[in-house]
Image (tube, rainbow, N blue to C red):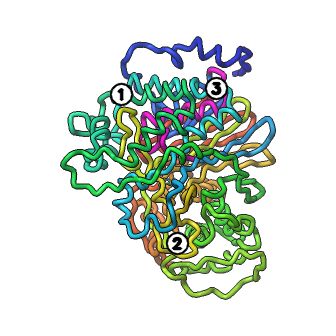
Amino acid sequence: MIIRRIAVPLAGILAGSSVLLSGPPAVASPPTDKKPVAEGYGGAVSTVDPEASRVALEVLRRGGNAMDAAVASAATLGVTEPYSAGLAGGGFIVYYDARRGRIHTIDGRETAPRAMTATSLEGIPFEQAVTSGLSAGVPGSVAQWELALRRFGTLSLRQALKPAIEVARKGFTVDQTFHDQTAANAARFADFTSTARLFLPGGAPPPVGSTFRNPELAETYRLLGRYGGRWLYGGGLGTEIVRTVKNPPVTPGSTRNVRPGLMELTDLAAYRALERPPTKMTYKGMDVYGMAPPSSGGSTVGEALNILEALPAVGMHEYLEASRLSFADRGKYVGDVPGVPLRELLSDGFAKERACLIGERAMAHPAPAGNPDGAYEPCPAASSPASPAGETPAEGPETTHLVVADRWGNVVAYNITIESTGGNGIVVPGRGFLLNNELTDFTFGPAPGDPNLPGPGKRPRSSMAPTIVLADGKPLLALGSPGGSTIITTVLQILVNRWELGMSLPEALAAPRATQRNTAQTQAEQGFIDRYGAELTARGHSFALNPEIGAATAVEFLGRGRLQAVAEPSRRGGGSALVVAPAR
Ligand code: GLU
């Protein structure tokens, strides 16, 4: 099929679009077919959600580019996946600009209020911090959307929000995942009047198959489109957010200890989304680009790949050990601080030194961090295990990731989050969205020297790892996943599956997963334990069952313009992959 570039200005096209602008009366959109793999031409999208994928595809079909589609899709995920994404959250975009042949990244990570110090979280039980005003970071998503559209898109924020407004107004069909996530949060949602009213209508999670509408969010998006980000970053919406953070609307009679937050309107006014140089490493001749600090995604995936490249053979034992080592280094060196030794962490010399530590048997736990100082030994003697401070606390399955490619060859890999599934559990009254609890990603301390202690204006270290791989300067693969620190291992394992074990991309996503993050036991899905457990246990690994790790999305560029969009076949209920012009 020949794709013609549309010559009419895009705003004109959108103005004539019933889908994007006006739309039929309020009935639920028909359920979209959900397929995990789509192949074809002219653009591709993969998200966890059929509505979000449909919206991205519509934007592409109407002449929008990958960034337009990504922002429209992210805003839609704020409607249909409100427990993972939303305008009060944050995220990271890795973007391939086809015209300039360059990778850019946009950091929309939340920040700590200026009143937050290294000891602000000390001694607070983690679970208590999760559901609190204290854990709410200054939202980054709206500033990120505006910057992304201004720099690389063709739509205004108002235009990009239209499809999400439609979905919020008309409603979407509640699926098992939405229902289960609501049910899992029901106890804390009930503790806030605003949250209970929105997500527990009639006092219970909405039943599977019912239509869920969010007219208040539709109105919030409409006003955001009209007034722009200023409404949030220092304006009226910002004032409402600050009020909610400082005085959460706790349900009368609730016994929950809800700590108020430190956020001020001046913190919102000071927020900036930032363009940052990507991380880059070369693996088997391919250039792997990722997200630099404050995310640890790019450096940790990159270091592990470098370690694997230094080994004579790679299987699941090596995958787990390389991951263990790079998590030890992540813990010691990576955070939103000056002087992260990125270049050395991603250097071949350091990787070779680290690779020397990988033997026939699993390493003693915990693996100590290495010394990325530029002076590397051919093979240093293994040092003794580190103190348990190097351990990584468990993280859950929250967050979401989307990939979009357009007909011009631009590519977006975008991780979006409000941290926990359900964020901090607190809906801003009357506005239809949850606040994030991103500041629980900081190390609570006391932990002298930890690069991830809280600080004024600081961004908590993330594990989000949107990744784009180029071969000969052209996109080959774009991928990412949710799942807290398991994001890193999920991305790494998919790359290992694809390039070391020779799986196709759909196989690489579907394959059972394990995650080793410098923990005593490796968490693994049952399928992984069944397949590799005996062999790896004989080599000193031990496993703890994790029922489901990650929910990846990816696009592979097969050459001659052919695209393969891939989502999960079953994790999180399965994702939705679509292409503009399906191959026959
Ligand atoms: N807050 C997490 C991070 O930035 C993402 C949310 C999650 O998946 O846990 O690493």
Q: Is mark 1 within 8 Å of ligand 1?
A: no
Helix, strand or loop under label 1: loop
Q: Quadrant of the C terminus?
A: top right
Q: Which residue is mark 2?
A: 518
| Camera-side residue of 84 and 34 | 84
Q: Is residue 63 magenta?
A: yes
| Camera-side residue of 239 and 395 | 239
- Residue 32: quadrant of the picture: top left
Residue 503, disc:
none
Q: Is mark 3 within 8 Å of ligand 1?
A: no
Q: Badge 3: how crowded within 10 Å, few (<14), some, or many (20+)?
A: many
- Residue drawn 52% across the image and 13% down it: 18
- Going by the numbered disc 3, the residue's amino acid type is Leu
Mark count: 3
Q: Position of residue 264 (x, y in %)?
A: 48, 48
* 407 sits to left or right of 464: right
Q: Is residue 246 visible?
A: yes
Q: Position of residue 516 (x, y in %)?
A: 51, 67
- Residue 96: quadrant of the picture: top right
Q: Quadrant of the N terminus?
A: top right
Separation of residues labelled 2 and 3 (CA atoms): 43 Å
**Residue extent of the magenta highlight:** 62-91
Q: Which residue is mark 1?
A: 213
Q: Is residue 48 magenta?
A: no
Which label lies toward us, 2 or 3? 3
Taking 575 as reference, is 306 above or below it? below
- Going by the numbered disc 1, the residue's amino acid type is Arg
